[in-house]
Image (cartoon, rainbow, N blue to C red):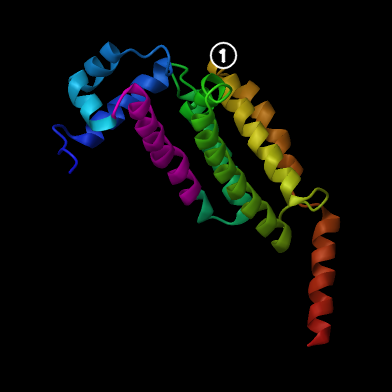
Amino acid sequence: MARPREFDEDVVLNATVQCFWRFGYEATSVKDLTEQTGVTAASLYNAYGDKRGLFRAALDRYVNDSIAQRIRRCEALPPLDAIHAFFDEILQRSLNDRQHKGCMLVNSALEMAPHDAEFQKIIAGVLVRIEVFFLGCVRAGQADGTVNRSLSADILSRHLLGVLMGVRVLARVRPEKAVLESVIAPALSQLAATASDQNQRRRGGERRSSRK
């Protein structure tokens, strides 16, 4: 039987996220974690196994509270609006990041994924989840005529993922609105449907109507 927690897990995980997010995995010491959480090392290790297990729990919390919630919010919008809203949030988070922490997921991708197979798989899975969100938006937008059809949905969604990663890294050293907007704007402009896309959609709708 698992031992009951001797602390408020939400409070401890939120504090742990802030610690790992600010300093990274390697630079975060057990002392940092105990000071940040107010919980002894023994209690933390009894609950999570070791520093690695605590980091895994913290990364899960960050993904669920930040990335997953953003995707859910944006999925409720029309396809093109959803992509714009997603990047609007990223821009605002980047500009309001006074400690220049960046994105914990992207930071972990740079620090741990290259040499840690377990975390490489975890991080890749989250990035695939983001790509799938973009892919769904692009496909729906191409279907309703709001997104450009000159490139495949697969290519556009992967391009958006690359832009996202680049913005989050760039923001750590150059959190300047003009710089970040200049990276995001061309990608969003490329999505906009052209007149030929809209005409093609109208003609397709007319052909379908004529068959009824």
Find residue 3 and report its horizontal and vertical position in percent.
16, 38
Q: Amino acid at mark 1?
A: Val
Name the one closer to the observer, 24 or 49.
49
One can see residue 39 in this view: no
Q: What is the magenta range?
A: 49-73
Residue occupying the point 54% across, 31% down = 120
Residue occupying the point 72% across, 48% down = 154
Q: Residue furthest bottom?
A: 212
Left or right: 205 in relation to 6: right
Find residue 148 and report its horizontal and vertical position in percent.
77, 51
Q: Vertical placement of 41 versus 136: above or below? A: above
Residue 58 included in the magenta stretch of the image: yes
Q: Residues within 10 Å of mark 1 (few under 14, many from 20)?
A: few
State which quarter of the image contains the N terminus: top left
* Secondary structure found at label 1: helix
- Decide whether the magenta segment is chiefly helix, strand or loop: helix
Q: Residue furthest front?
A: 1
Name the one closer to the observer, 149 or 103.
103
Left or right: 144 in relation to 203: left
Residue occupying the point 28% across, 18% down = 33
Q: Vertical placement of 118 versus 207: above or below? A: above
Left or right: 12 in relation to 51: left
One can see residue 33 in this view: yes
- Image-quadrant location for residue 178: top right
- Image-quadrant location for residue 189: top right
Name the one closer to the observer, 181 or 171.
171
Find residue 123 and report its horizontal and vertical position in percent.
52, 34
Residue 157 included in the magenta stretch of the image: no
State which quarter of the image contains the C terminus: bottom right
Query: What residue is shown with label 1?
Result: 173
Find residue 185 and report its horizontal and vertical position in percent.
69, 34
Left or right: 56 in relation to 193: left
